[in-house]
């Protein structure tokens, strides 16, 4: 051990070791408790978002349908679209 640049390791007081281990254990328990609490909260938020997503998807589908119908009506009115594509020929 004399080859170490700073000499042999210093013995750490049992009180300091106890404090370190107790803080580590307390931190792990604190983290587990709060992770559990936040997971439950997030699960509730996901349920709410799933319900809102279903409503939002229906609204978007209706809006898209209205937009395509409006575009189709405009194109037919302007004459840019042939009503019967089978009549197109050489």
Image (cartoon, rainbow, N blue to C red):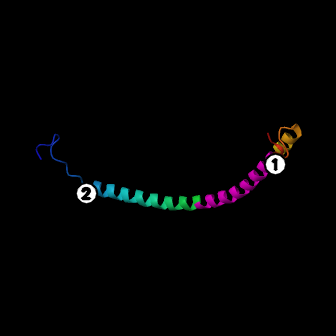
Residue 56: which disc? none
77 left or right of 2?
A: right
Looking at the image, which is closer to me, 57 or 5?
57
Looking at the image, which is closer to me, 53 or 36?
53
- For mark 1, what is the residue? 66
17 left or right of 5?
A: right
Residue 14: which disc? 2
Write the residue at 49% across / 59% down: 35
Q: Is residue 64 magenta?
A: yes
Looking at the image, which is closer to me, 43 or 56?
56
Q: Quadrant of residue 43?
A: bottom right
Answer few, some or many: residues within 10 Å of disc 2's Cα (few below 14, many 20 plus, some between 14 and 19).
few
> Start and end of the magenta stretch?
43-68
Q: Is residue 50 magenta?
A: yes
**How far from the left and from the top, in percent, is residue 79?**
87, 38
Looking at the image, which is closer to me, 11 or 8?
8
Q: Quadrant of residue 44?
A: bottom right
Which quarter of the rendered picture does the C terminus lie within?
A: top right
Q: Are marks 2 and 1 in contact (CB under 8 Å)?
A: no
Write the residue at 79% across / 50% down: 65
62 left or right of 25?
A: right
Write the residue at 81% across / 48% down: 66
Relative to 3, residue 34 above or below: below
Answer few, some or many: residues within 10 Å of disc 1's Cα (few below 14, many 20 plus, some between 14 and 19).
few
Write the residue at 65% across / 56% down: 49
The residue lying furthest to the right in this view is 77
């Amino acid at each position: 051990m004399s080859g170490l640049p700073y000499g042999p390791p210093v013995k750490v007081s049992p009180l300091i070791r106890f404090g370190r281990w107790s803080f580590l254990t307390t931190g792990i328990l604190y983290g587990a408790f709060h992770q559990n609490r936040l997971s439950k909260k997030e699960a509730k938020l996901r349920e709410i978002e799933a319900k809102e997503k279903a409503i939002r998807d229906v609204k978007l589908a209706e809006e898209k349908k209205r937009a395509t119908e409006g575009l189709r009506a405009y194109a037919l009115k302007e004459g840019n679209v042939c009503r019967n594509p089978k009549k197109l020929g050489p």
